[in-house]
Image (cartoon, grey):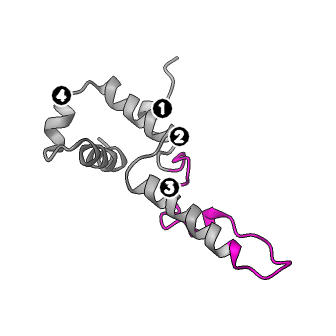
Amino acid sequence: MTDRRRRFALRLALELGYANVDGMLREMTAEQFDEWIAYFQIEPFGITAHDAEWAHWKAIYTNAHLRKGKRAIKPEKFLMFKEQRLDASGYFEEDEPWQKSET
């Protein structure tokens, strides 16, 4: 398992309330784990989702206090975890083995 997949497994265990990440992984198939990854890429949860929510609130507050004529600041500027974009597509690289199609 790659470090990225292990990190996601730890995040998923935290979200689902498992203290034993290896026990959680034994309870699910590889297909189910991949499905959780796909779901996370569509609808991030945990710290990634909270980071996006706070970025939006910070942008709203900042933009409400800008001087006239100043360009609005996008929420992405306020993300704490830049490598984990709002849609989480940056969290997993496309060259991960589970994303390659079999021919």
Query: Of the residues shown, which amino acid type is indicated by label 1?
Result: Gln
Q: Which residues are magenta?
A: 63-90
Query: Where residue 84 is drawn, which disc sits there?
Result: 3
Q: Main secondary structure of the magenta part?
A: loop
- Judged by depth in the image, the label closer to the viewer, 4 or 1, is 4
Under circle 3, the secondary element is loop
- Residue under pointer 1: 99
Under circle 4, the secondary element is loop
Distance from label 4 to label 1 (Cα)? 22 Å
- Judged by depth in the image, the label closer to the viewer, 2 or 4, is 4
Q: Position of residue 78 (x, y in %)?
A: 57, 69
Query: Of the residues shown, which amino acid type is indicated by label 3?
Result: Gln
> In the rendered image, is residue 36 in sight?
yes
- Residue under pointer 2: 94
Residue contact between numbered discs 2 and 4, judged by CB atoms under 8 Å: no
Label 3 Cα neighbours within 10 Å, binned few <14 / some 14-19 / many ≥20: many
Residue contact between numbered discs 1 and 2, judged by CB atoms under 8 Å: yes
Inspect the magenta stretch and tell me whether residue 94 lies in it: no
- Residue under pointer 4: 27
